Image (cartoon, rainbow, N blue to C red):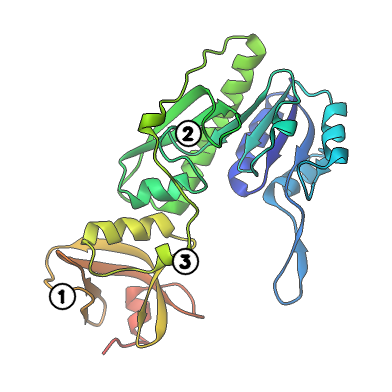
Amino acid sequence: MNIVFMGTPGFAVPSLKILLDNNHQISAVVTTPDKERGRGQKVTFTAVKEFALRNNIPVIQPEKLKEESFINYLKNLNADIFVVVAFRILPREVFSIPPEGTFNLHGSLLPKYRGAAPIQWALINGESETGVTTFFLDDKVDTGRVILQEKLIIDSEDDFGSLHDKLSILGAGAVLRTVNLIEQGNVELKKQNDSLASPAPKITKEILEINWNLPAAKIHNLVRGLSPYPVAFFHHKEKLIKIFKTKLSAAEKLMPGEIKQTKKSLFIGCEDSSLEILELQLEGKKRLTTEEFLRGFSFS
């Protein structure tokens, strides 16, 4: 099929790669504009753009998705379908262009976790299962008709980083299967049940700060859902400390926010029990194991 692929971060790259590896024609890649980062304001590309350039795929980076020049460019490509993986919200003027429609890969089992951060919220809410969904775009975000879904068991050791990578690979297979089904004219669409929908809003700074008055399991899942980025944190004597990994601990009975440390271990009290802190970082310093951290820092 003749495809226009739209995506931005590393999550989208396996999907683009699998289409290319299976001899689908990628007429162009659409991604977000380059950004200047760091003190030197060095220009950086998106992961999708980097992959496209290495594989000699034309790249377009519109500032505004309703620009007439951008829409005309897309129309002139005569693509059969647009494939969207971790990109921006498309207006109808764009997603209605190809004759076979536009489908999106979403990192949850829709209608659960509609929104910008489905992987994070599945972990934060302590889910034991998640997956990916491909669906045709509609005017309302994440509400279109489902093409297919793939399920995945969430391991107790999974955090955002590991689950993100697993779903990226699972999603690539789903994208290829979806394109093949559309090409074969063998798609059976399923309408989403809006009554089963749950939100997955963007992660804000307020969500990152740990409230030690909550149950230990809830805080543990918050840490998992935000590690390795953007990372849950708490303040101790005006110092910001990020927590990357924890372990539920029934052995230590501490008051919420109370800290107990030994030479090699660190425990913090929660509403019902305690958490053992396994990996953390003092603001401006490196991420360390608790044993490494405590060699140069005392909570007393």
Position in image of residue 263 (x %, y %):
25, 82
Residue extending furthest bottom?
300
The residue depicted at 11 percent of the width and 71 percent of the height is 253
The residue depicted at 82 percent of the width and 35 percent of the height is 71
Identify the mark nearer the N-term, 1 or 2.
2
Give the Cα separation between the discs numbered 1 and 2.
40 Å
Q: Are marks 3 and 2 in contact (CB under 8 Å)?
A: no
Check disc 3 and report its element: helix, strand or loop: helix
Position in image of residue 199 (x %, y %):
42, 44
- Identify the amino acid type marked 2: Val
Residue topped by disc 1: 255
Left or right of 178 on screen, residue 53? right
Q: Is 183 in front, or is 99?
A: 99
**The quarter of the displayed image where residue 65 is located:** top right
Identify the mark nearer the N-term, 1 or 3.
3
Residue topped by disc 2: 132
Left or right of 263 on screen, residue 83? right
Residue topped by disc 3: 205
- Identify the amino acid type marked 1: Met
Neighbour tally class for label 2: few under 14, some 14-19, many 20 plus, Cα within 10 Å: many
Give the Cα separation between the discs numbered 3 and 2.
26 Å
Q: Are marks 1 and 3 in contact (CB under 8 Å)?
A: no
State which mark lies toward you, 3 or 2. 3
Position in image of residue 11 (x %, y %):
58, 45
Check disc 2 and report its element: helix, strand or loop: strand
Q: Is 10 in front, or is 85?
A: 85
* For residue 73, above or below residue 158: above
